[in-house]
Image (cartoon, rainbow, N blue to C red):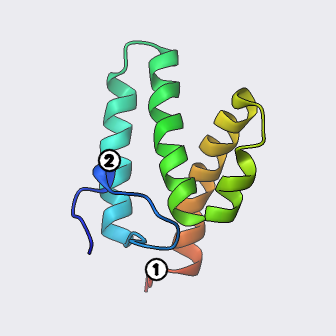
Amino acid sequence: MRKNNIENRNFISDENLWDYNEWQDLESKVSKKILASKDQEEAFQIGKKMGKKILKNYSNSFFTVTRFLPKEKRDLVEIIYASVRYPDEIVDTFDMS
């Protein structure tokens, strides 16, 4: 069963994959939170939290392997993965014509 609120979903690999509108909504909400953050550390934590959710939802095996990385590196991997996942969805999944 799909939930409407992306940020409060249970994130299970390969389920509830997001459509274009859901990605747009997510980008808007997370961007607003980051821009409203009080400092860079808070902005980093917001990005890291969302990166982890995206990674866990879209790649269970990669998510599991990243658990073996030191936390500092794992946090960065989650953010990087999230930043490239959306463009990958645009190219491979969404009908943009």
Q: Residue at x 37, y 20 (%)?
A: 37
- Helix, strand or loop for disc 2: helix
Residue annotated with mark 2: 28
Q: Nearer the viewer, residue 40 or 10?
A: 10
Residue annotated with mark 1: 94
Q: Position of residue 91 (x, y in %)?
A: 58, 75
Q: Nearer the viewer, residue 11 or 54?
A: 11
Q: Residue at x 52, y 17 (%)?
A: 41
Mark 2 residue type: Ser
Q: Residue at x 31, y 56 (%)?
A: 6
Q: Nearer the viewer, residue 7 or 1?
A: 1
- Taking 48 as reference, is 37 left or right? left
Q: Position of residue 78 (x, y in %)?
A: 62, 44
- Taking 61 as reference, is 21 left or right? left
Q: Quadrant of residue 38?
A: top left
Give the farthest residue toward the top.
39
Earlier in the chain: of badge 2 and badge 1, it is 2
Tell me if label 2 and label 1 are in contact, CB under 8 Å: no
Q: Is residue 85 above or below residue 51?
A: below
Q: Position of residue 12 (x, y in %)?
A: 47, 64
- Taking 11 as reference, is 80 left or right? right
